[in-house]
Amino acid sequence: MKKESFIYLSVIVAVSLMSYIDAIIQLEYFSRSIFKIILFAGTIILYSFIFKETIINDIKFNISAFKKILPFSIGVYILIISAYFIFRNIFDFSHVKDSLLSSVGIGKDNFIAISLYVSLCNSFLEEIFFRGYCFLHLKTLTGRKIAYIFSSLLFALYHCSMMIGWFNIFLYLLLIISLFIAGFIFNYLNEKFDSLFASWFFHMFANFAINTVGIILLFN
């Protein structure tokens, strides 16, 4: 099997299994996180074992990217929070709160701890998987266009699977499109700032904003 074919197949399998766990089995958040680490990190390790090469050579950790990306990161935080306050009287967000409490197992007692994990650790895991493995390494094998589309599409589909039933169909479709565009933006930031830290920092602040909305929903 060619390297690029293995990446396509392995990413689809990992995302499908994780989506099944999120949408169908609906384990509590700690168990989900363990499975996610095993699937995402295990996929990359398996690739390295089979093909005797590491994806690290295609990932750069340029710390200076932190300072460059900070204004954009603060901007996306403000944008997401503003969007919530603009649309909260137009769309019904009550299903989000109900899903967090019932299916995901997130409540007032553990929300802060989970939100910190999501913003700091989970975002880094996703950046390594979707940007490091599924974009930066894949594009060395197939080219930028295919890597951009594939990584962004799988990133969007994965996140939407865990949000089934949270929104009405219109808002759900808008979410899929937004996540697909976000995947493109994260890939672009990797290239522009020549560092995986750029997309991770941006991703982190986006999660901070989403978690802020979560706090508003849960504690009101």
Image: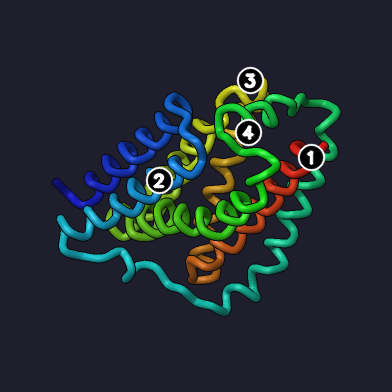
Can residue 176 be seen at all in this image of the molecule?
Answer: yes
In the rendered image, which residue does mark 4 sit on? 100
Q: What's the distance in space between the residues labelled 1 and 2, CA to CA?
A: 28 Å
Q: What's the distance in space between the residues labelled 3 and 1, CA to CA?
A: 26 Å
In the rendered image, which residue does mark 3 sit on? 169
Mark 4, secondary structure of its residue: helix
Q: Mark 1 or mark 3, which is nearer the start of the sequence?
A: 3
In percent of the image, x 56 and y 66: which residue is there? 198
Quadrant location, the C terminus: top right
Q: Closest to the observer: 159 or 69?
A: 159
Indicate left or right for 190 with 8 as reference: right
In the rendered image, which residue does mark 1 sit on? 219
Q: Nearer the viewer, mark 3 or mark 1?
A: 1
Q: Mark 4 or mark 3, which is nearer the start of the sequence?
A: 4
Q: What's the distance in space between the residues labelled 2 and 3, CA to CA?
A: 27 Å
Residue 23, image x, y percentages? 47, 27
Q: Amino acid at mark 3?
A: Ile
